[in-house]
Each structure stands twice: as C-alpha cells, then as structure tokens.
Amino acid sequence: MDDFLKRVCSSIFLFLLFLAAIFTTIWFFFGFFLLVVFYLYYEWQGLILPKVSKSLRMVMSIILIAMVSFFYFMGLNEFVWPTLLATGLIYFWLIKSKLSLSDYSLFLLGVIYIAFFFHSLVSIRFNFDSGKALLFLAFLIVWSVDVGAFFVGKFFQGPKIAPKISPSKTWSGLCGGMFFSTLIVYLALRSFSFEIDQHFVYVIPFIAILAQVGDFFESYLKRRIGVKDSGTIIPGHGGVLDRFDGALLVIPVFYMLLYFYV
C-alpha cells in the first residue's frame, strides 16, 4: 500500500474515531482522549529528551495523565499546575545528567501545554449545552486549515514562510488555510444551530494562524533532533503529535473565546 493510500485510510479511520469519541458515550470520550494525551506526552518527551529510555518516558506519561485526570475529576484544578511542575522537578533530578536547561524548559512547557489542551477539550465538551457540537467545530477549524493550506499551497506555491523550519509551508498556503477555515465555519454557523454568536466567524483567521504556529513549533522541535515525524503509530501520518500539533494551541484558545461568543 503506497503512502498516499495509507494516509487516506488512516484519515478516514481517525475521523470516525473522533466522531465516536465526541458524540457517543462519556467513557469512550475519556478513553480516547486520555490515550491521545498519553501519546502526546510520550512523543513530546521523545522530541525533547531523546536520550531518555522509552520505558522511563512511558512511565512518566502515565504519571502525568493520571495526575491531570485525577485533579480534573476531583474538581481541584488549582492544584494541577503546581503538582505538574513539582513532578517535572523530580523528573529533572532523576535524569539531570541527560538534560540541559533549555531541554528542561521545553519539557515543562509541554507538560503544561498538553494539560491545558486536555482541560480545555473536556471543558468544551461538558461546560456548554451544545458542547459536543462546539468541540467538533473546534477540530473542524483545525482540519479545514490543514486542508486549505495543503491544496492552496500546492497549487500556488510561492515564497516559503520559514524554509529552515518547515520547507513545505508557504504564505499562499497560510492564506488558503485562513480563507478555507473561515468559509467552513461561516457555512456551519449559517446551516446548523450552534450555541455561539455569528460574529465568531471574524476571529477564525486568527485561530487559523495559531494552528499554523502550532505546526511550526512542532516542526522546530523535530528539526532540533533531526527527525521527520514525532512517532510512527499512525500509518502515513507519523505520530499523534503530528496530527495534534495545531489543535494543541487552537483548542485552549477556542475554549477561552467561547466565553465571549456564547
């Protein structure tokens, strides 16, 4: 099976999993997204701490998702950030011989970054009457940015945004992603009943830029250690982090914006 066909099949399978996670049972929702968060933590460590053993990265990932989910379910969100930071300090002490200060800073950034992503997507799903539809809309923005950027960038090409970080990303692709995501959200808001103000469409270009920033940031991390993908678990796509790089920024920002537009 060639790479393109693998990519298409994987995309369809992932899309169906997303639909099931968002619109079916609570248990499937948490099971799916906790598994996603586990791989996000595992692959993030792989990019920042490539010298650390896979088994230690796996154990640390389990500890992190256990803490994030425990504090959320117990309603103790104010304790999650200092606890995560304290855990990061202990981790640093355990592997300090393999870790520079810049690596440690990036590791801590990822710990908070991914925890905030999980907190935001759970809050969108359960804190709003139409939480399922809103969460689907948030991911739809990320997907439409990727699709618009890919096809417009492929057709028009033109100047690169940051060729040393991501050689395939062009300014035309960025504009295509902004336009296509804005169009998709406009049509969605006009066609379906969302618990959101119609003026929300005006901030979509800004959100589209954030999705691309998340993509660039992950590309930068991969360039640091000379790898093409964050992992190999998704055929034709790479790792889970490769699929969620834009969503890690978009979902928290989308969640915060809902308080202004709902």
Image: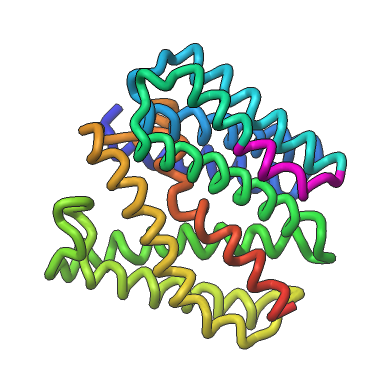
Residue 218 rendering spot, x and y as whole percentages: 36, 46
Which quadrant of the view contains residue 186? bottom right
Residue 63: x percent and y percent? 65, 24
> Where 239 falls versus 134 (above or below)?
above
Along the line of sight, which residue is nearer the eye, 188 or 199?
199
Left or right of residue 165, residue 210 in this image: right
The quadrant holding residue 62 is top right
Q: Is the magenta region chiefly helix, strand or loop?
A: helix
Q: Is residue 216 visible?
A: yes
* Magenta segment includes 233: no
Task: Tell me which residue sits at (71%, 32%) in the image.
Answer: 67
Q: Image check: 15 left or right of 49?
A: right
x then y, percent, for residue 217: 35, 51
Visible residue check, residue 238: no
Q: Residue at x 35, y 40 (%)?
A: 102
The magenta segment is: 75-85
Q: Residue at x 40, y 18 (%)?
A: 52
Which residue is painted at 19% across and 54% down in the image?
168
Q: Relative to residue 197, is residue 129 drawn left or right?
A: right
Give the farthest residue toward the right: 74
